[in-house]
Amino acid sequence: MQILPQKLAAAGQADRFHRLLTDFDFIDAKISVFGSQSAIEDYDLTKNPDLLLFGERVDTLRLIQDAIQLSANILAEDNTQLAGQLLGRLMSYEVSDIQAMLEQAKQWKAVPWLRPLTPSLTPPGGPLLRTLTGHTFDVRAVAITPDGKLAVSASGDGTLKVWNLHTGEELRTLHGHTNAVMTVAISPDGKLAVSGSWDETVKIWDLHTGIEVSKIIRHNPRLEAVAITPDGKQAVSASNILKVWDLHTGAELLTLMGHTNWVRALAITRDGKKIISASEDRILAVWDLKSGEVITTFNGESALMCCAVTPDGVTILAGEASGRLHFLRLEGCSQQIL
């Protein structure tokens, strides 16, 4: 069962391969024994050059694969949910092979179950690809490694989790904070994560091992945001003040004061020369990273909750609690694109 799809694909047996992967009983058995990720990877074999699958048959298999992937977090906890998940996600597709598979699913009787009568679950083909579950409280921040392979989530449960973005697998949990973890950033080389918590600490983690490399203590309460400079040498953290740290020694280099309420987000320009901070005091500030001086500010009409800067270093986006989004251009500074 484990390698049968691979054998059929390698042998170029397109008809048998297609029948197998549209057979509910096979899918159910595969997931029951080997898990949903193993089943999901079977459908990747449609890319095998020896397998002459095209047109509607490929589209059908991709819809089933996407439906299983959308359901993976549910199936990891209870694989008896497969029939209900597939019916709830695929019922609206008037494709003969899918409808035949769903008719099989309706006959499944291994345990009592609730059969959806309408396509009430998120269907495949939309923006949602997969749901990652594991935290026991709200997720407050997420960062992705530069190679796009891993994600790190920060949660109110006091932990960070490292995820494989391709499989959705939880690789490790980072324990050490004693209060909600509000923010996380990843170094440009993808090797370190920097987290900030309401326990008044910034922690630096080795993403490969999950080991806490160092700890920066006594940042003012309600630490809300961290960012790392593009060269990976410095980190910036924010509560109602900003602090600049040497990422490798943990030494505090600068304290930046000026906001009168909590700073909710930070961004650093691509050249590593400017910090942008968005605060609940309705002010977006641009700081000189070397001197710690404010270069300029912009006043919103409600609390500023997030910010980002484009690669040109002069175009800034800032989001308000009201839902308003500001597109701003930094004038009067060097506008060289780096």
Image: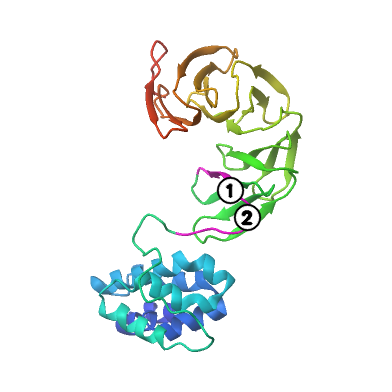
Residue 142 shown left or right of residue 333 in the figure:
right
Q: Are marks 1 and 2 in contact (CB under 8 Å)?
A: yes
| Secondary structure under the numbered disc 2 in the rendered image | loop
- Quickly name the residue at label 2: 135
Q: Where is residue 12 shown, x and y percent of the image?
A: 33, 79
Is residue 262 or residue 43 the one in the foreground? 262
Q: Is residue 126 magenta?
A: no
Task: Identify the residue shown where x is 51% and y is 51%.
Answer: 149
Crowding around mark 2 (Cα neighbors within 10 Å: few <14, some 14 to 19, many 20+) is some
Task: Identify the residue shown where x is 52% and y is 85%.
Answer: 112
Q: In this view, does 217 lie above or below 24?
A: above
- Quickly name the residue at label 1: 139
Q: Tell me which secondary structure the magenta stretch mostly adopts.
A: loop
Q: Which residue lies furthest to the left in this view?
A: 55
Magenta part of the chain: 130-146
Residue 315 shown left or right of residue 273 in the figure:
left
Quadrant in the rendering for residue 309: top left
Q: Where is residue 50 shown, x and y percent of the image?
A: 32, 74
